[in-house]
Amino acid sequence: MTPDSFPLPLHKADSLLQQTFEQAVAIVRPNFHMGLDLVLAIIPLVIALLIFREKSRIPALFWWPLLGIMILFLPNAPYVLTDVIHFVAKVRVTPPLPIWAMSLLLVEYFFYFLIGMECFVIPLMLWEKTLRRHHLGRLIIPLELLIVSLSAFGIYLGRIDRLNSWNVVTDPERLVNQSLHDALALKPEEMTLLFFVAVLVLYYLIKSFNSLIAGLLVSHETQAVA
């Protein structure tokens, strides 16, 4: 075989390989918005760990406002699921990503989505534990459905209308007007319902998984003590 029979000169092949590698690294590298979204998602988790402690000493004067802030920021946690559009955009590139880059991208977004949803599920599980401690278990399911509904609508406001939790302070008039407009329109209701179903299904799946892990840990500790 003569050198002229090669479909591509070796130096050009090396250059193309390097270009593909650099492109793959640039695509796999986490974006700034992912870090920001995770920070916003972690806020309700941190607040929940503070206010739902069994022997919390936070006075009611601060406890209720903190609860309100937690609820206000909760939609930011499942909101990360809508970043699947960025995942699809990264996957649909030309030339196609190599296997190693696709694998890294899948792992990256899996943990990104999982952390976001855990920041939603754990606060509600802690809230449930607090309600049971005060013999208010009957409120758990209605509360879960209410929070998921509000979060689904919040996801719509964030993804479609580009509103944020802090607009309550920075631009409350626009937030109220847009929320009322969307609440009465057909398309926002349909998309909110779609978000509601997706978040609700994932919420109960992850909640069941967390409960299973917690049960196994308690059982292991009990056996160790015995």
Image (cartoon, rainbow, N blue to C red):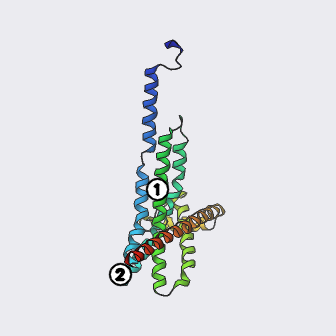
Residue furthest to the bottom: 135
Left or right of residue 223, residue 196 in this image: right
Residue 195, how many percent across, how many down? 59, 62
Q: Circle 2 — which element?
A: loop
Residue 115, how many percent across, how many down? 45, 60
Q: Residue at x 36, y 75 (%)?
A: 50
Residue furthest to the left: 57
Left or right of residue 113, residue 142 in this image: right
Viewer-proximal residue, 73 or 126?
A: 126
Q: Which residue is drawn at 47% across and 42% down?
A: 101
Residue 175, how many percent across, how many down? 50, 66
Dot 2 amino acid type: Ser
Tell me the tag on residue 56.
2
Residue 35, how many percent across, how many down? 40, 55
Quadrant of the image containing the C terminus? bottom left
CA distance for labels 1 and 2: 31 Å
Q: Which residue is drawn at 40% across and 50% down?
A: 32
Q: Circle 1 — which element?
A: helix
Q: Residues within 10 Å of mark 1 (few under 14, many from 20)?
A: few
Q: Residue at x 43, y 75 (%)?
A: 218
Does the rendering let one see residue 162? no
For marks 1 and 2, give the one nearer the viewer: 1
Dot 1 amino acid type: Phe
Q: Mark 1 points at which residue?
A: 111
Q: How crowded is mark 2: few (under 14 residues within 10 Å), some or many (20 or more)?
A: few
Residue 148, quarter of the rendered image:
bottom right
Closer to the N terminus: mark 1 or mark 2? 2
